[in-house]
C-alpha cells in the first residue's frame, strides 16, 4: 500500500496531465482563440443573398484574415440579409467606399467575405455601413441560368452577355459541338 | 391453455416489478451517497486513493489504446480519403471522430472493464465476507467509508481519462498521417483547427464522458453492493457490471448525440 502522500502526488500529476491535454485540445486541435477575442470594430453590410455564410465565417482582405462575421439577420422591411462584421482594430484604415463580396473557398468550400479596398480618404469606423455589396454566387442559380441559355440558343453560345456564365456556356457549347 | 397464458402474464408482471425494484434500490443508493454532508477531512484522502486506483492506474491501458485507435483511424481514413484526393482532410476526420465519439465511448468501455469490474468485485467480496456488516457494527457507515469514495473517484477520473485519450489518439493519427504517410504537418493541424469547434466538439465529448462516468460507476457500485454474498454471486455481479455498463454507454451515446446534434 502506497503512502497517502505518494498517492496524492500521483493524483496531482494525473490532474495536471489532464489539464495540459485539455489546453492542447483547445488551442492546438480546435484552434480556440475566442477566449482572447481581439478588440475590433463593427461594421454592417446588406446583401440580397448570403448563400451559406455563417456566423464566425472569416472576413478577408487580399486573402488575409482580418475579422469574422459576428451576426446575421434579416431586415424585415427590405428583406435583405444584414451581416455584421467584426474587424480587427489593427485594420482601421479601410476606405469606406470599399466593396464587399461573398466568395466560396474552392469549388465546394465554405463561404467567406472578402473586402476589396477603394480610394476614399475617409475610413470605415464603428457602426459604418458598407454600400457596395456583391451577393454570393449560388451554384444552382448559375446552373439554372446556363441551362436556360443553352435551351434558348441551342449549341451556339450567347454572344452578348458579359457574365461569367458566358464562359461556361462557351465551354459547354464547344463540347456540345 | 388459459393457465399457461396467465402464468406468462404473471412472469411478465414479476419481471417488471423486479426491474422497478432494482432501479429503485439503485436510485436510493445513489441518492444516499450523493446527498449527504461531505466529511472533507476524512473523505478527501479516501477519494484521492480511489482516483489513484481508478484513474491513474487506468492510464496505461487508456494511453496504449488511444495511440492505436488514433493510428488505425488515420490509416483507414487516409486510404479512403486519398481516393478522392482529399488526404489533406485527414486531420479533421480523425479529430472529429475522436473528440465526438471514439474518445468518450472507448474510454468509458475500457473504464467499465478496467475499473468498474474491479470495484464490483471488491465491494462484492467485502459484502460476502461480512466486512460491510462489521463496519456497521463499529458504527462506521459503509456507504460513507466504502461506496462514496469509489463513486466520486470514478466520477472524477472518467472525464480526465477521456481528455488524455483524445489527445493521445490525435497524436497517434499525427504519427501515422504526417510521419509515416507523409502528409504536410501544417495542413494537418490547420485543417483540423478550422473544422473542430471547441464547444460543440471537444466540450460535448467531455459532457458525454461525464455522463458515461456517472453511469458506469453507479452500475459498478450498485452491483457490488447488492450482490448475492457467494462466489457465484460475485462472478455474476462482475459480469453484469460490464454488460450493463457497455449497453448503457452505447445506448446513452446515441441519445446524447441526438440531443447534441439537435442543438439540445
Image (cartoon, helix red, strand yellow):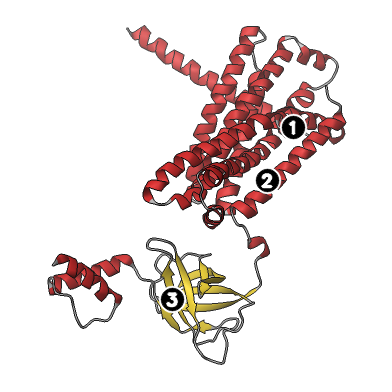
Q: Is the residue marked by circle 2 packed among few (<14), some (14-19), or many (20+) residues within 10 Å?
A: many
Per the model, the C-alpha gap separating discs 2 and 1 is 18 Å
Label 2 sits on a secondary structure element that is helix
Per the model, the C-alpha gap separating discs 3 and 1 is 55 Å
Q: Is residue B43 visible?
A: no
Q: Mark 2 lies on which chain?
A: A
Q: Mark 2 points at which residue?
A: A21
Q: Mark 3 points at which residue?
A: A101
Which percent across, then down, holds residue B181?
Answer: 50, 44
Q: Would residue B177 be found to the left or right of residue B148 on screen? A: left
Asked whether the residues under marks 2 and 1 belong to the same chain, the reply is: no
Which percent across, then down, holds residue B81?
Answer: 41, 47
Mark 3 and mark 2 in contact? Answer it, CB < 8 Å: no
Q: Name the residue under label 1.
A: B51
Q: Quadrant of the C terminus of chain A?
A: bottom left
Which percent across, then down, holds residue B121?
Answer: 67, 17
Amino acid at each position: 500500500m502506497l503512502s497517502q502522500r505518494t498517492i496524492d502526488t500521483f493524483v496531482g500529476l494525473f490532474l495536471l496531465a489532464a489539464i495540459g491535454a485539455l489546453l492542447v485540445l483547445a488551442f492546438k486541435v480546435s484552434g480556440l482563440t475566442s477566449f482572447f477575442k481581439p478588440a475590433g470594430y463593427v461594421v454592417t453590410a446588406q446583401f440580397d443573398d448570403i448563400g451559406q455564410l455563417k456566423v464566425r465565417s472569416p472576413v478577408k482582405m487580399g486573402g488575409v484574415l482580418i475579422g469574422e462575421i459576428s451576426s446575421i439577420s434579416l431586415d424585415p422591411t427590405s428583406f435583405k440579409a444584414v451581416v455584421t462584421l467584426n474587424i480587427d482594430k489593427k485594420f482601421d484604415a479601410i476606405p469606406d467606399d470599399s466593396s464587399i463580396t461573398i466568395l466560396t473557398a474552392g469549388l465546394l468550400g465554405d463561404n467567406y467575405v472578402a473586402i476589396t479596398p477603394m480610394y476614399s480618404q475617409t475610413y470605415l469606423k464603428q457602426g459604418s455601413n458598407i454600400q457596395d455589396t456583391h451577393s454570393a454566387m449560388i451554384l444552382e442559380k448559375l446552373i439554372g441560368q446556363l441551362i436556360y441559355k443553352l435551351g434558348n440558343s441551342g449549341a451556339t453560345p450567347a454572344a452578348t452577355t458579359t457574365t461569367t456564365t458566358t464562359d461556361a456556356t462557351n465551354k459547354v457549347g464547344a463540347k456540345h459541338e | 391453455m388459459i393457465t399457461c397464458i396467465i402464468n406468462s402474464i404473471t412472469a411478465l408482471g414479476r419481471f417488471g416489478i423486479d426491474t422497478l425494484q432494482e432501479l429503485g434500490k439503485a436510485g436510493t443508493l445513489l441518492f444516499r451517497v450523493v446527498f449527504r454532508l461531505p466529511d472533507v477531512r476524512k473523505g478527501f484522502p479516501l477519494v484521492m486513493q480511489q482516483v489513484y486506483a481508478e484513474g491513474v492506474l487506468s492510464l496505461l491501458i487508456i494511453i496504449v489504446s488511444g495511440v492505436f485507435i488514433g493510428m488505425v483511424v488515420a490509416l483507414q481514413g487516409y486510404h479512403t480519403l486519398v481516393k478522392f484526393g482529399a488526404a489533406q482532410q485527414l486531420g479533421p476526420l480523425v479529430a472529429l471522430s475522436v473528440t465526438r465519439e471514439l474518445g468518450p465511448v472507448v474510454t468509458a468501455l475500457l473504464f467499465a472493464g478496467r475499473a468498474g469490474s474491479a470495484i464490483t468485485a471488491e465491494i462484492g467480496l467485502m459484502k460476502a465476507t461480512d466486512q460491510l456488516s462489521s463496519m456497521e457494527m463499529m458504527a462506521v457507515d459503509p456507504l460513507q467509508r466504502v461506496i462514496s469514495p469509489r463513486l466520486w473517484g470514478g466520477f472524477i477520473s472518467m472525464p480526465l481519462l477521456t481528455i488524455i485519450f483524445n489527445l493521445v489518439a490525435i497524436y497517434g493519427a499525427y504519427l501515422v498521417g504526417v510521419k509515416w504517410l507523409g502528409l504536410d504537418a501544417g495542413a494537418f493541424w490547420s485543417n483540423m483547427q478550422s473544422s473542430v469547434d471547441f464547444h460543440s466538439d471537444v466540450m460535448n465529448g467531455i459532457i458525454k464522458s461525464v455522463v458515461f462516468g456517472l453511469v458506469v460507476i453507479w452500475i459498478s457500485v450498485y452491483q457490488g453492493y447488492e450482490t448475492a454474498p457467494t462466489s457465484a454471486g460475485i462472478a455474476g455481479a462482475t459480469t453484469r457490471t460490464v454488460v450493463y455498463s457497455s449497453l448503457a454507454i452505447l445506448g446513452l451515446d446515441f441519445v446524447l448525440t441526438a440531443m447534441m446534434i439537435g442543438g439540445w
